[in-house]
Image: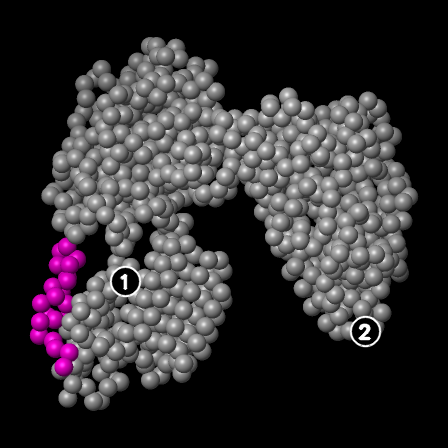
Amino acid sequence: MQSRMHPKYYLSQEIFDREQIKIFRKVWLFAGLTSLVAENNAFITRKIAGIPVVIQNFKGEIKAFENICLHRSAPLQQGFCGRRALVCPYHAWSYDATGAVKNIPDCEAIYRFSADEKQSLKLREFALKQVGSMLFINLSTEPMAFEEQFKPEFVALMESAAQSFDTEVMVTTWHGKFNWKLVYENLRDFNHVKFLHAKSLAAIADFPFEAPIQADLALTPLEDISIPGLRKAMRPFSYGGPEGKIDAVRPVPWLNMVERWGTEDAYFNWLAYPNLHIACGNGGYSFTIEHHIPIAPGQTDIEIYFITAKKKQPYAASYQVLLSNMHYSKTILTEDIDMLEQVQSALHIDAPIPTQGAYESTNRQIERWYTELMETEHEI
Amino acid sequence: MQSRMRPEYYLSQEIFEREQAKIFRKTWLFAGLKALIPDHGNTMVRMLAGFPVTISNHYGVFQAHHGQEAQAIQAVGQLLFVNLAPDPMPIHDHFSPSFFSSLESCSTAWGSEVLHTVWHAKFNWKLIFENLRDMNHVRFLHGGNFANYLDMTIPVPEELAEEAAQPLDDTSAQSLRAAIRRFNWGGATPVLIPHRRKVPWHAMVQPWGGEDRYYDWLAYPNLHIASGNAGHSFTLECYTPVSPGRTDVELFWIMARKTQDFDFSSQALLANMHGSKQIVGEDIAMLEAVQNVLHSRAPMPHQGAYEAQNRLIERCYATLMDTESEF
Amino acid sequence: MKSRWVVGTGDYLDLAYHAWTQASATEDVQKITVPQGADYEFDLSIFDTLHPELGDVFIAVDDRFGNFKRMELFRVALERGFTLSSFVSANADVASEAKIGKNVFIGPQAIIGHHCKIEYNSVVHAGAQIGANSHLRASVWIEPGVQIGSRVEIGTHAIIRTGAIVRSGIKVGKGAELGWPQLYSADIADKTVYDTRYDEPILVYGS
């Protein structure tokens, strides 16, 4: 079958901008970990779909605001994360937990704002949702319900795992030279594992997959293109669970130092559409969160968080455990990244449209939905 | 008050090109110093409004050419200004007589040694001017150093605040020229330098101005001059817009003319430059952070009464960008 | 004749063994490899055959697991009563009043400036330069040719790789790894890893 994915979806700036507005500014997106904003005044900053965001802890309450001071447009907080009151470093305007201006130094003497004007100064706030120790954000002014985007069983399993996350987290970012969609097409395709990862992942895990029935192949156009219909259609795009079979986990000392999540010796995967992947390759001892941030049609930042299950007690070498696990998973991820960068570099506007097999039905479902959004005025 | 400055003024390539055409190819631009081409036959090439312009010294007469075409050039003391318009406005339409003579007086007092470097900043050129006209940021952003030795109070120009709130009714070229004349100011500021650090070379030059005061000049749209040591040495900052999000910040350091010869003056200027690098570095880092978070749907800035001068300039700027009015 | 047991694993064990052999004519230098199991744990049974009254131990395990593996054997040897004398190459230039801790290795052509302090179990490889008044805490690993300025503080378990230059006055956090060949001119937070295979530093938050 021919795919619906025209090369322009991976190359065009116009399509990229449309994705940012029609998908990324509408849906719930991964925004960070609560362990990074655990204390009063702790914050993280991000740029999501072009909008700078600060997520800040106000005496236990976690809020998300546009990270732009209303005075001279300076970012209120800088750096990936830190601990500092929500005060602009430029002219020291401060803001409270509702996003309202709390104090402007010498307001009477030099600004002369009326009471009304001062009261009207309020930061744009964004909806946040906590799932275990993960935070999700929605940039829309009228955010859809979290449950509209994700199935309850998906959320429940992910939440259960995310409740077991330790508070020590290792973070890095890679700059991938490919379109963000290629990653997810790849992640939904277990067939590549035995070829691309023949010596790495395939040696330790086995991912069974099958070709579904004809009805799942998304051969016909989407029927319900109303807003609720398109939201409903995207719900199955996020799924997760024990997808891979693994050999018994090799006993290394650190496994005894953590409270394992669950008991199943399996390779767990979660894919949260559009840009979050969580993997747990050792049956609940540690987790990799991969957050893919679209930067440009041919550029995607891959933000990696590495976490073990909760430690039973702190120990000095725990960060070295994270580091060796990260180095290991890097070897597999690099195989994917190299391949996807090759794909991107060979793409051109007249490149042949991909041909898909029956086993690629999930990708086909997503592509049908995606092209509907890109090619029409329909919205989610 | 809500500012008139929409995010697109700092982000759009189209606006950038309109600025180049309607501001930078119409006004008098700082184009270098005589000291850089002191002898007959010396030349330098300056990027002005996107064009390479050759400035040359022809038996002491300074000339400007873009290709074969001669451009209007005007020396003001040591300073050279070029106007790229086919029918350039008289320089006194752009610089008031008092501003002109203040520039002339101070730059005539300068020596001939010039220290020069360029920083490549990632922000829109207008942000730096908005920052320079805002004394309120100093105590917060530069709290660590600058604010400690300068004694700054923030003036609130009451009458301007009222005026800036009104729309610009008269948008004739005459009125717009009158408007930008007011954007250029300079000389003695109300800021005193009560604790100027005395260094030996200060006694070996003839300081300009004669007071322990902070001196500074702003020549819209591309020049800032300051002396933070009461006229013993001067920093010139020339801002060259490269793209909506890029500005070259060119720095020149010059001493007041020497009263006796000494051979370490370039090291004294270098020490000055390193000292100011920290402060200008703080400004640049902040403005790059501002540029970095700007996006087309970002909130409009809110200004206080003390920012009336910026509001006046923005009124004129928005008129130029959004209408067919010209200088 | 007293024994000098050079105990550890890998290339660094070889290097330390040869260094001790060349340096001490009055000792019987022996190389003892400690095997690591599939779970990376050491087989410590070899220590049962070594006695402090018959000689001294030098632990030679490289930077694996952030120097924690060398630390593990160091602790075992200390508990068993060994002195764990440091090794300073005769060709190193070490300021006379510099303080050097137990089980430290200082390779040939290394330069240690005046008033430096190098704490126990640290390794300064050949040709590394440590500026005056610098302080290396315990279990640090400095690769050949690294240049470290004056007044630099290096936290425990840090790793500085060949090609790194650390500017004077900088603090390098504990557990940091400076693996990108470049000038480091700002303080480095604890556990920050600059690994050449990565696009950005690896950072650790929380505990």
Quarter where residue A303 is shown: top left
Q: Which chain is home to disc 1? A: C
The type of residue carrying mark 2 is Asp
Camera sees residue C76: yes
Residue B48 sits inside the magenta stretch: no
Residue drawn 46% across and 15% down? A377
Q: Secondary structure at mark 1?
A: helix
| Residue A270 x, y percent position in the rendering | 26, 31
User: In which quadrant will I find the N terminus of chain A?
Assistant: top left
Residue drawn 71% across and 66% down? B268
Q: A346 or A140, which is in the foreground? A: A140
Q: Which residue is mark 1?
A: C67
Question: Magenta part of the protein: which range?
Answer: C33-53
| Residue A276 x, y percent position in the rendering | 33, 33
Q: B26 or A155, which is in the foreground? A: A155
User: In which quadrant will I find the C terminus of chain A?
Assistant: top left
> Contact, CB < 8 Å: mark 1 with mark 2?
no
Is B308 situated above or below C106?
above
Other-residue count near label 1 (Cα within 10 Å), few / some / many at <14 / 14–19 / ≥20 = many
Quarter where residue A260 is shown: top left
The type of residue carrying mark 1 is Asn
Left or right, residue A355 beside residue B121: left
Residue drawn 82% across and 46% down? B186
Q: B208 or C81, which is in the foreground? A: C81
Q: Which residue is mark 2?
A: B261
**Distance of label 1 from label 2 (alpha carbons):** 60 Å
